[in-house]
Amino acid sequence: MLHITTFENTKVNVHVPSLIQQGDQQFSVSALGVKVVTLPGKTRFGEFTGKDTKGIRITVNKPISVYGYGRILLGSHHIGEGFLGLPVDVLGKEYIVPTYSPVGSSIVQVVAQEDNTEVSFMLRLPRGGRVHYGDRYLYNGDLLNTTLNDLEVFQVQGDSDLSGTVVTSSKPVAVFSGDDCTVVPDNTFPCNHLVGQIPPVSFWGKEFITNPTPDHLGGDEFHIIASKDTTDVNVDRQK
């Protein structure tokens, strides 16, 4: 589902090409209100590496905030995960992907916003890791190329961590990464899915401030990825 909120009264149009027979959803959102858009399961991508028209376009006449949320029932437990959506004016043409060690699969998805968008994946995989694509397997260092049209999605699904995979494109794209099932921290329950929209390298920085997660007795874990060689990193560890 999508959650849409705004500081001003606004009109929203949600275009879902995989539901084209239902037409666009159009509605109004009041200032400081939240509109929840529920999408059926068939709007999800399947469990494979390849292409499908699963993108969603949201257009408005005033600034909004968008976050997605998915929830599933695992045994007797409801588990969920959300992500903050980034507007198209901050999209870029170079990304370095973070994922987390999966119990099942790690996933990277690229969504095009223009026709004839050429996309390349330079795969980064640990020893023994692989990506199944068609009738072959791809390994660390292999290059995967594709061309996407507007709102087409290309998904890369690997059986191990895909962190460090580099995505480049001829036109700005949206990139998402996550896992279909993982545990954070290790050896805990439940096995939840992860998802996040990734900012392009052009929006990366050199200084970050973080805040400990409340009531998290296990501490916080940070994964740092460098975009260039000989990058020095300092963590002050202040309490």
Image (spheres, rainbow, N blue to C red):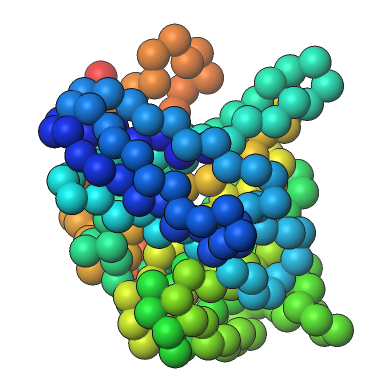
- Left or right: where 146 falls relative to 95: right
> Where does the image place residue 163, in percent across and percent down from the top left?
54, 60
Residue at horizontal 76 percent and vertical 78 percent from the top:
133
Q: Tell me the quarter of the picture where residue 200 sits.
A: bottom left
Query: Does residue 120 appear in the picture of this structure?
Result: no
Looking at this view, name the residue that lies furthest to the top.
215
> Where does the image place residue 53, in percent across and percent down from the top left?
59, 69
- Left or right: where 158 falls relative to 70: right
Viewer-side residue, 17 vs 138: 17
Q: Tell me the quarter of the picture where residue 125 sits.
A: bottom right
Q: How many numbered marks have been drawn onto this rendered protein structure? A: 0
> Where does the image place residue 24, in percent across and percent down from the top left?
46, 54
Residue at horizontal 51 percent and vertical 82 percent from the top:
148
Asked if residue 181 is positioned above or below residue 14 in the image, the reply reads: above
Asked if residue 7 is positioned above or below residue 25 in the image, the reply reads: above
> Where does the image place residue 130, in percent across and percent down from the top left?
75, 71
Viewer-side residue, 57 vs 232: 57
Residue at horizontal 75 percent and vertical 44 percent from the top:
103
Asked if residue 116 is positioned above or below residue 234 in the image, the reply reads: below
- Left or right: where 105 falls relative to 228: right
Viewer-side residue, 149 vs 25: 25
Residue at horizontal 29 percent and vertical 36 percent from the top:
28
Query: Does residue 40 appear in the picture of this structure?
Result: yes
Quarter placement of the C terminus? top left
Q: Tell me the quarter of the picture where residue 212 sits.
A: top left
